[in-house]
Image (cartoon, rainbow, N blue to C red):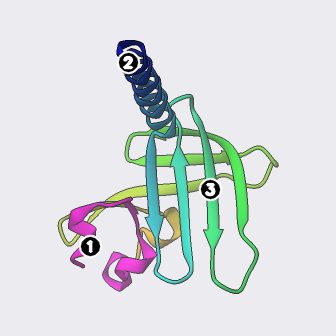
Amino acid sequence: MKFRYINFLIALMIILVASCSIKEQRGEVWVRGRGVTSSFELHKDGTYVSKENCDICPEREVRGVWRRDAKTLVLSARSGAPNQVLVELDYRGCHGYVPVEQSFKTDKLFPTDIYFRWRDECARHL
């Protein structure tokens, strides 16, 4: 009976350590839109995965490397597609990113145009 309890505790510790390491690898997740969504995950190793999702279209996924320069985030796809440059901004008090071509029209932006950190409480109230 005592050995079963010890084995159970060891298995539980292994599961906890594994789940923490998976969370560490994920890094930051940014999302924009409702219904049709775009997201990207910035992994701590400098790679990213970008996805576009909607109910009636196939999921699109792009992988590559990312870097931050001052107030910009640059996503470089492995496929050789042009870099996606996102500009950091504060929108109604919430921190987010928009594509550089939209950064000059901040007065015409809607919350669905902006990437906010996944589960950001501030962005939920916009």
Amino acid of disc 3:
Ser
Q: Is residue 3 left or right of residue 95?
A: right
Pick whichever, 125 or 108, lies toward us.
125
Residue at image coords 73%, 81%: 57
Viewed as shown, does residue 119 lie left or right of 115? left
Looking at the rendered image, the quarter that the N terminus falls into is: top left
Q: Earlier in the sequence, mark 3 or mark 2?
A: 2
The span from disc 3 to disc 2 (Cα, nearest Å) is: 49 Å
Task: Give the distance between the C-alpha atoms of the residues marked 2 and 1, in whole angstroms.
Answer: 49 Å
First of labels 1, 3 by sequence position = 3
Q: Amino acid at mark 1?
A: Arg
Q: Residue at x 54, y 55 (%)?
A: 40
Q: Is residue 10 above or below residue 61?
A: above
Q: Nearer the viewer, mark 2 or mark 1?
A: 2
**Which residue position holds label 2?**
1
Q: Secondary structure at mark 2?
A: loop
- Per the image, label 3 sits on a secondary structure element best described as strand
Which badge, 2 or 1, comes first in the chain's sequence? 2
Residue 27: % across, % down:
45, 39
- The x and y percentages for residue 59 are 72, 69
Q: Quick one: label 3, few (<14), some, or many (20+) residues within 10 Å? A: some
> What residue is shown with label 3?
50
Residue range of the region highlighted in magenta in the rendering: 106-126
Q: CA distance from mark 1 to mark 3?
A: 21 Å
Q: Residue at x 35, y 14 (%)?
A: 2
The residue that mark 1 highlights is 124
Q: Quadrant of residue 24?
A: top left
Image mark for residue 26? none
